[in-house]
Image: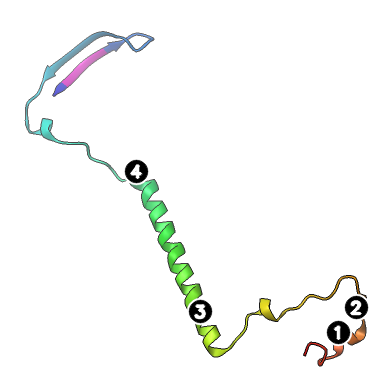
Amino acid sequence: MKIYTKILLDINNNVIEEKFFHYEGIISYCGIHYDFKSTRGAKAMEKQAKREKKLAERRAKKQAKAEEKGVTTKSEDTKMHDISKTITLEDLTNPEKDK
């Protein structure tokens, strides 16, 4: 393994002068070690995917319980009024109209 003590480069990154020595000790056999910062993005994506999966499971479980009990959601119950018709007092106050 080369241990550089001095490297002199020009503007085009060409080596003008270099001073080094060869090292054959224990450290020369070490590999590349990744630190926390290099894997931070991947870990964040895994965490986000895990969060979304857990949230989807909760929603599905909650929806299954609601269907078991026979409870309908508001989106199914709500009916829009016809825009072309004028809203009358009877439309607003008659409880039998929706049935």
Q: Is the magenta stretch mostly helix, strand or loop?
A: strand
Question: Where 27 falls versus 6 (above or below)?
Answer: below
For marks 3 and 1 on the same chain, the one whose residue lies earlier in the sequence: 3
Q: Which of marks 4 and 3 is in front?
A: 3
Task: Report the amino acid beneath label 1.
Answer: Leu
Farthest residue toward the bottom? 96
Please rate how many residues cluster around mark 1, counting C-alpha atoms within 10 Å: few if below 14, some from 14 to 19, many from 20. few
Which residue matches tag 1? 92
**Res 31 quadrant in image:** top left
Q: Mark 2 points at which residue?
A: 87
Mark 4 crowd level (few <14, some 14–19, many ≥20, 10 Å Cα): few
SS at circle 2: loop
Label 4 or label 2, whichever lies nearer to me, is: 2
Query: Mark 3 or mark 2: which comes first in sequence?
Result: 3
Disc 2 marks which amino acid? Answer: Ile
For residue 23, side relative to residue 41 (left or right): left
The residue at which mark 4 appears reads as: 37
The Cα–Cα distance between marks 4 and 3, rounded to whole angstroms, is 38 Å
Can you identify the residue that label 3 sits on?
Answer: 62
* Relative height, residue 73 to residue 22 (above, below): below
* Earlier residue among tags 4 and 1: 4
Q: Earlier in the sequence, mark 4 or mark 2?
A: 4
Q: What stretch is highlighted in magenta?
A: 3-7
| Snapshot quadrant of residue 2 | top left
Q: Look at 36% across and 52% down and name the residue there.
A: 43
Answer whether labels 1 and 2 touch (C-beta < 8 Å).
yes
Distance from disc 3 to disc 1, alpha carbons, whole Å, reads 32 Å
**Amino acid marked by disc 3:** Lys
Identity, as a three-letter code, of the amino acid under mark 4: Lys
Q: Which residue is drawn at 26% across and 41% down?
A: 34
At which x and y percent is residue 44?
Answer: 40, 52
